[in-house]
Image (cartoon, rainbow, N blue to C red):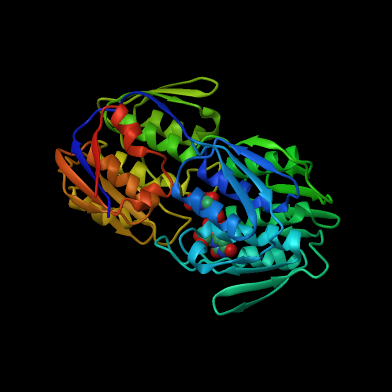
Amino acid sequence: MEKFLIKGPCKIKGQVNISGSKNAALPILAATLLFDTPVIIKNLPRVKDIDTMLNLLSSLGSKIQLSKNKKIVRISKTSKKRVFASYSLVKTMRAGILVLGPLLAKFKKAQCSMPGGCNLGLRPIDIHLNALTQLGIKYKIIKGYVHASAKKGIIGKKIKFSKISVGATENSIIAACLGKGKTILKNCAIEPEIKDLTNFLNSAGSKIKWIGKRTIQIEGVKSLNSIKYSVMGDRIETGTFCVAACLSEGNLIVKNFNPKLINTELNLLKKVGAKIKTFKNEIHIKGPKKIKNLNNIITKEYPNFPTDLQAQFMVLLCKAHGRSTITENIFENRFMHVAELRRLGAKILIKENKAVIEGSTNFQGAELMSSDLRASVALVLAAIISNGQSIINRIYHLDRGYEKIEKKLKKLGVDIKRVS
Ligand code: UD1
């Protein structure tokens, strides 16, 4: 199994190009199931989750043609039509459930493995299933699979999500695109990746309109047109590199990302002392000598602070002067990195969903274990500023969502090696 060897402390200096967004690309790829004509998706991140989604689409009968650098894919229909999303593919990537809506909209039938829980907690799919049921589907759960059908197709309806869910909003939007009549979705997630999905679908001829802050109106269309679409940049990768610069008294230029989309995060980094200049698609960030503490960061749906940057900010606050707190409101089990950070010397107390972080940690390198995607990158950040060598095991978690992270970090001055 591959691991990272990191020798710290290092300073982050230079320029980094942000890759395409994993969380925007996944629903867009799932939505290609709606098309009869070829679609070209550009700016794909080269990460494992994208491979898994492409394998899933291929297993459902799509023809996948990747460019040499694997950042552009042409997806077209074959004569095979399959509606079975297997456990082996969905278990490794929960976003596999995003094929349920498009399969039902296009083929009126789907058998999709339930994703099951994960390291972050239970992660049920009840909101997806509830919304799709209101849009006219029927389903049974048999032996771990959702067996669903939509005999009359997807039928437009007014729906209010009981809770804001990124995935359920995406599944419902994609399904309603080819539905009969008008669908109104209320209490939607409004993450930038969802706006990227609606931009993609509208460029292909869908009739999706944001008619309120969290309300979408969708007029069903009969079919979608062949298009080329470039996926937005990765918000979480951008935030992670900005934290790395801030943490290491670094000096970094982050390219290919619209800073307006991470206003909340950049304001927090300014509060801890970072000097930040923003341009159209670029961020210049200088880390402070003395990092200030922050009181009560709370993870919440966009435009609030994202749960996917919670672990990275926790590392930053370990280095701050004074005590900080972070409350995790999205996932019930998202403090897996804490035990590993403690092994490097962090002083963090967990009380239910709140972490109390004592600052001024002098991290000392150690052997560590990755547990999930964002927890793993937090360990990498901590190792970068630790004294001595750290070994990070199970980095396959990182490969699910960060493109060439060690190459990018090495270019910025980090002493990092991938070994088997
Ligand atoms: C997406 C992101 C993930 C991010 C998360 C929250 C992708 C591929 N993944 O995940 O990186 O951390 O948003 O920003 O885009 N819930 C239910 N029932 C449901 C669905 C969700 O109870 O049917 C709960 C979840 O357990 C969680 C909360 O709602 O507590 C939010 O989950 P959701 O927004 O759906 O996250 P994902 O779409 O799975």
Depth check: give the residue in front, 79 or 249. 79
Residue 336 lies in what quarter of the image? bottom left
x and y percent of residue 170 in the render?
64, 52
Horizontal and vertical percent position of residue 351: 33, 60
Residue in view at x 35 percent, y 50 percent: 375
Q: Residue at x 27, y 36 (%)?
A: 320
Residue 189 visible (yes or no)? no
- Horizontally, residue 280 falls left or right of residue 202, namely left
Q: How many marks?
A: 0
Q: Position of residue 17 (x, y in %)?
A: 44, 28
Instruction: Report the residue that reaches farthest toward the right.
Output: 181
* Residue 207 image offset from top left, x and y in percent: 80, 44
Residue 73: quadrant of the picture: top right
Q: Answer above or below: position of 405 versus 134.
A: above
The residue that appears at 50% across and 39% down in the rendered structure is 70
Residue 147 appears left or right of 6: right
Report whether residue 117 is seen.
Answer: yes
Give the residue furthest to the bottom.
Answer: 142
221 relative to 288, above or below:
below
Query: From what the image shows, is residue 233 above or below residue 94?
Result: above
Query: Quadrant location of the N terminus?
Result: bottom left
- Residue 343 in the figure: left or right of residue 170: left
